[in-house]
Amino acid sequence: MEEITQPHTPCSASMKLLGDYWTLRIIDALKGGGLRFCELQRTVDNLNPATLTSRLKKMEETNLVTRSEDTEDKVSVRYNLTQTGTDVLPILREIDRFSAKLSSLA
């Protein structure tokens, strides 16, 4: 039996990255500005540190966030959205709008 493969498109690549629940939650948490790892962990429902580390690493690799040393405390690291990460915010607003619409129908 032949395996059917789906063509790789820019949309499918975006969905693969943004379809991850935690990635969207992290982007949402960073919309107000940079956060340190512990602040980000608390903001995103006390997300498991290993999962948060994994998602942040992937988000850095795909240019959604930047990681920088906190100038006040050289031991801590601060995460910020890049322009690409900021470009996702209108998508999150539309998801919120859609969710509210669904809630009103129930």
Image: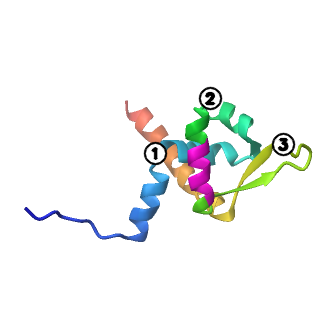
Kind of residue indicated by mark 2? Asn
76 relative position to 82: left or right = right
Q: Nearer the viewer, residue 91 or 4?
A: 4
**Amino acid type, label 1:** Phe
Q: How many marks?
A: 3
Mark 1 vs mark 3, CA separation in Å: 41 Å
Identify the disc placed on residue 98: 1
Comparing labels 2 and 3, the label whose residue is closer to the camera: 3
Of 104 and 19, which appears nearest the observer?
Answer: 19
10 Å crowding of disc 1: few (<14), some (14-19), many (20+): few
Q: CA distance from mark 2 to mark 1?
A: 26 Å
SS at badge 3: loop
* Circle 3: residue type: Val
Q: Nearer the viewer, residue 52 or 29?
A: 52
Task: State how far apart marks 2 and 3 are (Cα).
Answer: 21 Å
Residue 60 falls in which quadrant of the image?
bottom right
- The magenta segment is 53-60
Q: Which is in the foreground here, disc 1 or disc 3?
A: 3
